[in-house]
Image (cartoon, rainbow, N blue to C red):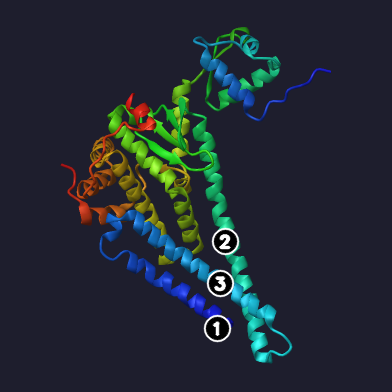
Amino acid sequence: MASIRIRARGELEAEVMRLLWAESQPVGASELAQKFPEPQPAYTTLMTALSRLERKGRVVRSGDSPRKIRFSPSRSDEEYASETMMTALGGAGDRRAALLAFAGNLNDEDLDLLRANFGKGPE
Amino acid sequence: MLLTALACVACAALIAYFAPSLMTVGRWQLLHPRTALAAWFGAFFLGMALCVAALMLSVGGAVSASVSTPVLDAILLTLGGWVSLALFGALAFFVVSSAAPVVASERMSSATLASVATSREEFAGYTLVRFDSSDEIAYAVPGRRPAIFLSSAMERALTPPQLLAVVAHEYAHLRQHHGFAVLVAKINAACLPGLNQGRSLNRATTLLVELAADDAAARQVGAVFLANALVTLARNSGDQSMQLRADRLAGKQWPRRRGIGRHDTERKLLAR
């Protein structure tokens, strides 16, 4: 009996995005399915994932008839990576415990203390 | 035994009350941040040790009460033991509930940040992860696999020796376990809401870890490179704290540096 590989939650969407980023032109769902490594997802499963990505604003749909519908990523992988990074960094103050950033950790009281003892101010 | 336990609690309370005032006299803590950090945490852990000793003494006293113990003493010892255990339970619950969001946040941010890397390079003690961003960002992520993240804009803005100084600053955070210190101070502040003691340790830790990492990087790479990196980044971002950190470095005496580029890590970073 052939084994069925079950993708982890969100894995299909991540693979769809990786394949779309690799393409220079918009691609249709059938064509995209061919680019998947085995096991290829069913057409309907892929359309569901693409519709979900479209709702999230990560994919743009183009084409004037159902047979000619093509999909392309709304942002490049670099733009998306940068945005994700900024979201992760701009979150809660609790994250300071995990991330020791080079700048932006000192508050106004710290600045006053440093200014009173060492401050020359910008030239 | 109960009296000794009460004495331990009194000593812990005295340390908590006087330590913040004593630590912030003069500007010695700004000139010697690592020593100051050790003093703050020495006082903190001494206070904790005294509380644990008081707990053990009061529970030990309650357990050792026997038939021959006078009735009033036996009641006091038993009551002391139960009160101590109740306080310990409440404290443990508070610590665990305060730590949970911080730890969850650490896991989430590490996973998110690791997924956006454009390159990874292994060095002794950490992984250097580069990512694309138009913002000048560098930070360290402590943990089982410590990493230093550098944005492309940061690499473009600085010269190789200045960049090396920034990496040395972040590496000092990892080597001196600043992530753990910040975490302990944050949980302590959450356990003492509204009290100056919790806030003082938290505030001192945030400032002192930055200054201690600056000093370590200045000794390792050269104060001039770190100060110049701070001035450049302050100019680009308008963040005055970096200008003040540069002023502090410029006002200190530094031992003569033996020249950068001797270590493998330095050579690799300078070669860019």
* Secondary structure of residue under mark 3: helix
The residue sitting at 31% across, 64% down in the picture is B24
- Labels 3 and 2: the sequence-earlier one: 3
* Three-letter code for the amino acid on which mark 3 is drawn: Ala
Answer with left or right where residue B138 lies relative to residue B254.
right
Relative placement, left or right, of A77 versus B58 is left
In x, y percent, where is residue B76?
63, 85
> Which residue bears the numbered disc 3?
B53
Q: Are marks 3 and 1 on the same chain?
A: yes
Q: Which is nearer the N-term, disc 3 or disc 1?
A: 1
Name the quadrant of the N terminus of chain B: bottom right
Task: Identify the amino acid type marked 2.
Answer: Phe
* x, y percent for residue B107: 55, 41
Do tag 3 and tag 2 residues touch (Cβ < 8 Å)? no
Q: State the separation of the CA atoms marked 2 and 1.
A: 27 Å
- Quadrant showing the C terminus of chain B: top left
Locate residue A113: give its quadrant: bottom left
**Image: B244 above or below B55:** above
Q: How many marks?
A: 3
